[in-house]
Each structure stands twice: as structure tokens, then as C-alpha cells.
Amino acid sequence: MNTDVVIVGGGPAGLMLACELSLAGVRPIVLERLPEPSAEPKANGLLGQVVRMVDRRGLFERLGGGSVPPQPNSAYFMFAAMDLDLTLLDESPIYALPVPQRRLVDVLAERAAELGAEIRWGHEVLGVRQDDEVGVDVAGQDGTYRLRARYLVGADGAHSVTRKLSGIEFPGVTYDRTTTRSAHVTLPATSIDPGTRALHVPGYGHVRPFAPNRTERGGFSYAPLPGHPPLVSTTEWDQPRTDAPMTLDEMRASIRRVLGADLPLTAPEGAGPHVLRRLFGGNTRVAARFRDGRVFLIGDAAHVYASGGGPGLNLGLQDAVNLGWKLAAEIAGHAPPGLLDSYETERRHAARRMIMNAQAQTALIAPGPDVGGLRDLFTELLRDRDTVQRLADLVAGADVRYDMAVPDAHPLVGRFAPDLAVRTAARTVRLAELARSARPLLLDFTKDASAAKSLAATRADDRVEIITAATESTEATAVLLRPDSYIAWASSSPAPTAAELDALRASVRRWFGESSDHRTAPRRMS
């Protein structure tokens, strides 16, 4: 056996998994068929729950987020080109981090290498065979060779070779009516409001940045991305197909049809590569299974969505974080029964939520008077706080709640942990900082540290880092966090009851296995 884990695909999901495995002591090999990271402009940033997740791994600042912790968008967002008034909410779940995909790949590759992962650029998978291990035939820069690994993870995109070689079907829906055009352009300075960055289109009106606009003839959006020329995009229905190269004249004509007005634009300035592309149709598909024996799928290899808003990166990076600690536990020999199977159960649930999001938005931006009537109804519903909350949570992926098998579970159980402020006599530290080691955490804020003592007495502290401290939060007095920051157990009691402590110990066994003879003392933050 050459390695414990081979990851196929050096994109964001594959590299994030390499980081997660390495944090847990597993040194994977990443195979990427491209000789170097692609310079082709792709995604422009991270949206939703994943922004908070990269903060939990110390990557937020490295990705350009600055030294201030992630802040939610509390003004407005969009659902199917309709306003979500986030000012109605007590707390917005919409987080955004503008970062080009090439920069994201560079940062994740750098971090994975720091942690000990091996990344092989220009190595393409030719074959996969399973027995008691996984055999991988590879074409490298110096010829073909074979790797053997305990596990193989396909993170190789929508056209995944890993998925196809493993015989995993990819059912779903193909949308063939739409044509999407995108281009980096130069716009007249006089057409952009310096304060709001809104774009004024003569004969149409103002277009807010990053906000999709729907007309009866199609959709239009304008994105003034930092460090790049503005990106304009259109979507039209039932356009004739063509194989001719995309041009700026075609972009201008499409904008004219969609908005009923001309937008003065010229070629982008500065070094490229610049976007100038035309895409026909799209797909919403989810793999028939995310696991086939010793082979797993994550990211676009497992699911693709024909909608905007960055669902692919949001889902794919969180797939990696969900799978990483479970796979590492299995390799280390202390995974409880069924832990690896929970990857598919949990991430398929998240994928289904995003399918609903994608298909609903696709239906609501389509042309036609019936859709117009439905949009009028939605506009009325979007004055309701609860409706805005549900849609904002859906878009952000914050509505995902895993089944932690805890009877009479606390409302926080199964959800992504809020960023609690953990207070000690010396300082206050954010939960995001405590989570960077990717270890299970018990945070005990009770005065007598009863949860910590109960867990330490069972020798579970070799699996779980136990921290006794204080917090100003009133949401819970003690929480058990998995490495992916989802809450496996929680209590709001000043002193957890015997039944609650039994549930705590059961949760530790359920997710982190039985204790060994090795023991470490609980850590009291100071």
C-alpha cells in the first residue's frame, strides 16, 4: 500500500479534504490531471455557511477576509431575482467572501502542503479497481504507474472520472432552454454610482451590484469584483444554438434584448485571462450514491446545480469537512460502527436541500405570465419575517440539521455551532479559534464543570478536548462539537441532569468511539 488516501482532483473540494485529513494525521496524495492550477476564471467567491467554516480552520484571513471575523450581510440579498429584506431578521445567515477560485486553490494547496499532503500536478487517473484496497492506475509526467490506497475520494468535478470508473450513475435534470453569456468588460465611469456601485443603464434604470434582474425577456446581472474588470451576464431562453466564437458584440446584443436598452461597454483593461463565454443549458444532478465500497465522492463529482449563488463551492467544501474527520478516524482504528456511512446520509440531506433551492429558483426566473403571477405572490410573502428567514437559511445552507440520535434533543443539536465567545480570567477567545485543530470539543460553561468531570471519568478525554470556561451566551451551558463544528449534544441546565450526562456520554461513543487507556487531563482555559 502506497498511502492511506488518494484524492482525485486538485480543485477546492479535493484540497480542502487534503487539509482536513492532514489535520487529523493522515497524509493523502492528491492527483490532479492539470499541470498547474487553472487560470480560467470560474467562481468568484464563497457564500453562506462555508464562510464560517473556513474561519473555523484559520483560512478566512488568508483568503482575503481581513483580520475582522466574518460579518453577515444584514441588508439585502436575492432569491430568484427577488429581494430578501435581511433587515427583518435578528441575525442574518448570509455570509460572503469575495475570492477568485484560482486564489482559493492557491491558498488551499499551500495549506495542504504545509500540513504534509502530497499534491501531484499533471497526474491523470486511468483506472480504478477495488478489492481489500483500491488500486489506481495513473498517467504521470514520467509515465504510467500504479498506486494502492485504503480509500479513494473522487473530487474531480461534474465529469468525474472516479464516478464513471466506479459505475456510479448521475441522475438528474438537464435544462436545455437557456443560454447564459458572461463577459469581463469596461464600463463608462459615469455610469457607475461611486457610493453604491450601482450601474445606470440608460433607458432601463439602475442595476444593483451582484443582484440578478429578471425581465420578461431574460435575466441580467452586474458584478464589480475586486481586482477584476466588471463582469456582466445575461440569461435568455430558447435562443438558437451556435458554435461561433463568443464576441462582445454578441454580449451587447443580448443585453439589448434582455433589458430593452443599450449598455455602452468595451473590452476589459489589464492582464487576463478575461471571461468571454457562452453556455447552453445546465444540469441539476446528484450521484446515485456517494460511496461505493472504498470509493467516496465529494463536491461536483457528487452533485451539480443549475443555479447561481455559489451552491457548488458551499456544498463541496463542507462535503470535504464532513468526510475528512470520519475517514481519518476509520484509518486510525477508532471509528465507531456506521461512522463512514453517516457521510452519505448527512451530505445527501444537504444536497437535497440545495436541489430544492436550485429548482425553485430556476422555476421562478423563467419567462411567462404564469411565472409572473407566482412572483407577485412571492413578493407579498417576502414581506413576512419567517419566510425571509427560511429562504435566507436555505440559500446559505444554514437550514441543514443532522440527526444526532439524541432523545429530546436541545434545539442546537444537529446544527452548525454559533461562534460563541469563550471567556477566561485572562482573555476571551472565539470558538472559531478553538476549532482550528479540527478535534472534537466539549465546552463546559457550568459553574461546577459537571459535564467535563462526567466525560473525563469515562476516559473519553483521549477522544475529546475538554475545555471548561465561561461564556456570555445564553444559548447553552455546555456543548459537544464534532470536528466539522456541528453540535452533537447540548444542555442549557445550570447543572446537566443525570439523563443529560448519559446522553452526552452516548453521543461521544456514537461519534468518537470507545475510550482507550490513554488519558489526558481536561484543559481549563486560562
Image (tube, rainbow, N blue to C red):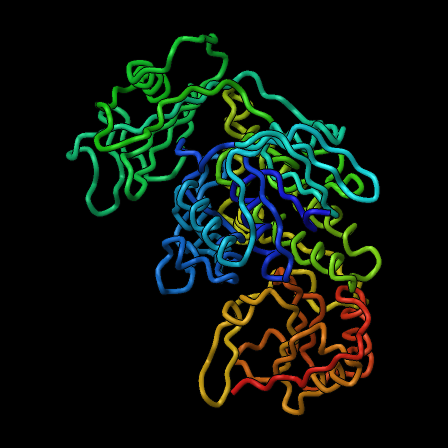
Q: Residue furthest left?
A: 190
Rendered image quadrant of residue 336: bottom right
Q: Position of residue 222 (x, y in %)?
A: 33, 33
Residue positioned 53% across, 38% down in the render: 378
Residue positioned 74% across, 57% down in the render: 331
In the image, 416: left or right of 201? right
Q: Is residue 11 visible?
A: yes
Q: Residue furthest front?
A: 142
Rendered image quadrant of residue 413: bottom right
Residue positioned 49% across, 57% down in the render: 114
Q: Position of residue 227 (x, y in %)?
A: 28, 42
Residue in front for this viewpoint, 134 or 172: 134
Q: Is residue 224 above or below residue 187?
A: below
Q: Is residue 430 above or below residue 486?
A: below
In the image, 299: left or right of 450? left
Residue in front for this viewpoint, 256 or 154: 154
- The mark total stands at 0
Residue in front for this viewpoint, 343 or 49: 343
Rendered image quadrant of residue 465: bottom right
In the image, 339: left or right of 478? right
Q: Position of residue 332 (x, y in %)?
A: 74, 61
Q: Position of residue 210 (x, y in %)?
A: 37, 39
Q: Is residue 222 above or below residue 436?
A: above
Residue positioned 51% across, 45% down in the render: 382
Q: Is residue 216 visible?
A: no
